[in-house]
């Protein structure tokens, strides 16, 4: 880039050189979306030459199977005559067809894999676009250009995009190895105690959603997601999925699961931006499909979460039995509950041994007090900072 030229100027030259109409580039500049236009034009880098009929002929896939795979990857159903596929698309689809019809994997497994790939890559792509299109951080100096951050991203667009395939491949390989290792170490789950499944959700989220702005609500969800991933992964577990104000996780080791659950409850109390978190866990056989988990154990953990008090961890009787030898843990029995589709179950509240009070209410009151103390401290610091505001001082 020549001296005095702005990164956005270089990006304009690249787009015009690619044959993007000047009025389209100019409009993107005026709208402040030049980096997004660049990604739109540069991301694929392939000519779309084939419609659904040509794709069927080139890959040997019946049209219904081809459409099914394409939809399972998360893309709209192709319309007749629309040039939608590139040579790379056809090569990948042909490889999938060979797997399916060569007996390597069944069609059901193939569609399952493509659904997981499609949904995972959609999340990655959405996160990247969020990063590119996010408003810039307020500059420290008043004379800093307001478009500085987007232009920095824009100036690297051509190097920014090719980097990600290798990153994704390496991360995928490492997760593949980790998943295989987990299954090897787990052995025959039918002969063992099974897996620990846990749910944790934010108490009062629905009421909160009616009281705050969309931006504030999104910030709360973001904070909770960060907390959930940090605590679960640090404890040796795996986040199965986030469902708004709830996280589902799986852990191989019951002791690690207890650390994670208590850690989620404790960490949420230390974060004034979050409401209390309640956790439910159960241990037993689990059906794992397409990165998700199903079965009676999952249902029991979900039901346990729904009846947990704010700030507490509720566990199934089987998990309590697996944990009772740990001197750092304590339990408080709950009255037996009739749970939907599960019958009458005797659940327990899991506690740190050194803070086991006589009643559940004492736990709640203690932790509510901790939250109030954090809020008071924050409010006090804000008042102090307002009193010291130089704009309020007289001449």
Image (cartoon, rainbow, N blue to C red):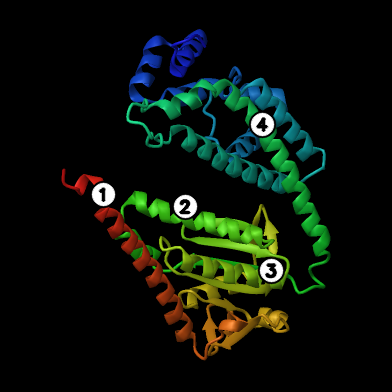
Real-space CA distance between mark 1 and mark 2, rounded to the nearest whole angstrom = 30 Å
Q: How many marks?
A: 4
Eye-nearest disc, 4 or 3: 3
Q: Decide if residue 115 is in sight here.
A: yes
Q: Position of residue 184 (x, y in %)?
A: 83, 58
Residue 256: which disc? 3
Position of 38 with respect to 114 (left or right) is left
Residue 165: which disc? 4
Real-space CA distance between mark 4 and mark 3, rounded to the nearest whole angstrom = 34 Å
Eye-nearest disc, 1 or 4: 1
Q: Nearer the viewer, residue 171 or 347?
A: 171
Q: Secondary structure at mark 1?
A: loop
Looking at the image, tell me whether mark 1 or mark 2 is earlier in sequence order: 2
The reply to whether discs 2 and 4 touch (Cβ–Cβ < 8 Å) is no
The residue that disc 1 covers is 389
Residue in the image at 59% along x and 74% along y: 300
Eye-nearest disc, 1 or 2: 1
Looking at the image, tell me whether mark 3 or mark 1 is earlier in sequence order: 3
Residue in the image at 75% along x and 42% along y: 173
The reply to whether discs 4 and 3 touch (Cβ–Cβ < 8 Å) is no
Above or below residue 184? Residue 142 is above
The residue that disc 2 covers is 222
Among the 4 quarters of the image, the one containing residue 381? bottom left
Q: Position of residue 356 (x, y in %)?
A: 56, 85
Looking at the image, tell me whether mark 2 or mark 3 is earlier in sequence order: 2
Q: Secondary structure at mark 3?
A: helix
Among the 4 quarters of the image, the one containing residue 67? top right
Q: Nearer the viewer, residue 141 or 320?
A: 141
Q: Secondary structure at mark 2?
A: helix
């Amino acid at each position: 880039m020549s001296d005095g030229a702005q990164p956005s100027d270089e990006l304009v030259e690249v787009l015009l050189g690619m044959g993007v109409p000047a009025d389209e580039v100019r409009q993107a500049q005026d709208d402040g979306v030049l980096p997004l236009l660049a990604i739109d034009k540069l991301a694929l880098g392939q000519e779309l030459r084939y419609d659904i009929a040509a794709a069927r002929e080139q890959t040997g896939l019946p049209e219904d199977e081809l459409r099914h795979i394409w939809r399972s990857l998360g893309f709209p159903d192709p319309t007749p005559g629309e040039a939608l596929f590139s040579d790379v698309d056809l090569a990948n689809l042909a490889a999938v067809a060979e797997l399916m019809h060569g007996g390597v994997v069944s069609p059901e497994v193939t569609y399952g894999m493509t659904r997981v790939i499609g949904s995972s890559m959609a999340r990655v792509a959405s996160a990247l676009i969020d990063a590119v299109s996010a408003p810039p951080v307020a500059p420290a100096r008043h004379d800093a250009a307001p478009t500085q951050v987007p232009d920095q991203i824009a100036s690297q667009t051509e190097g920014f995009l090719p980097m990600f395939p290798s990153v994704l491949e390496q991360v995928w390989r490492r997760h593949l190895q980790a998943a295989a290792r987990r299954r090897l170490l787990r052995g025959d789950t039918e002969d063992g105690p099974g897996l620990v499944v846990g749910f944790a959700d934010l108490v009062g989220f629905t009421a909160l959603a009616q009281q705050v702005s969309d931006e504030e609500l999104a910030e709360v969800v973001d904070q909770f997601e960060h907390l959930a991933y940090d605590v679960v992964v640090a404890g040796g577990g795996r986040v199965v999925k986030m469902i708004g104000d709830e996280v589902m996780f799986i852990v191989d080791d019951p002791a690690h699961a207890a650390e994670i659950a208590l850690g989620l409850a404790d960490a949420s109390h230390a974060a004034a931006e979050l409401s209390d978190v309640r956790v439910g866990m159960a241990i037993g056989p689990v059906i794992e499909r397409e990165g998700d988990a199903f079965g009676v154990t999952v249902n029991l953990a979900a039901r346990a979460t729904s009846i947990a008090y704010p700030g507490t961890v509720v566990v199934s009787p089987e998990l309590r039995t697996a944990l009772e030898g740990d001197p750092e843990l304590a339990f408080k029995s709950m009255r037996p509950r009739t749970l939907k589709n599960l019958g009458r179950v005797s659940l327990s509240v899991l506690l740190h041994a050194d803070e086991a009070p006589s009643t559940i209410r004492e736990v709640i009151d203690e932790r509510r007090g901790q939250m109030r103390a954090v809020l008071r401290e924050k409010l006090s610091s804000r008042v102090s900072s307002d009193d010291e505001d130089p704009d309020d001082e007289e001449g």
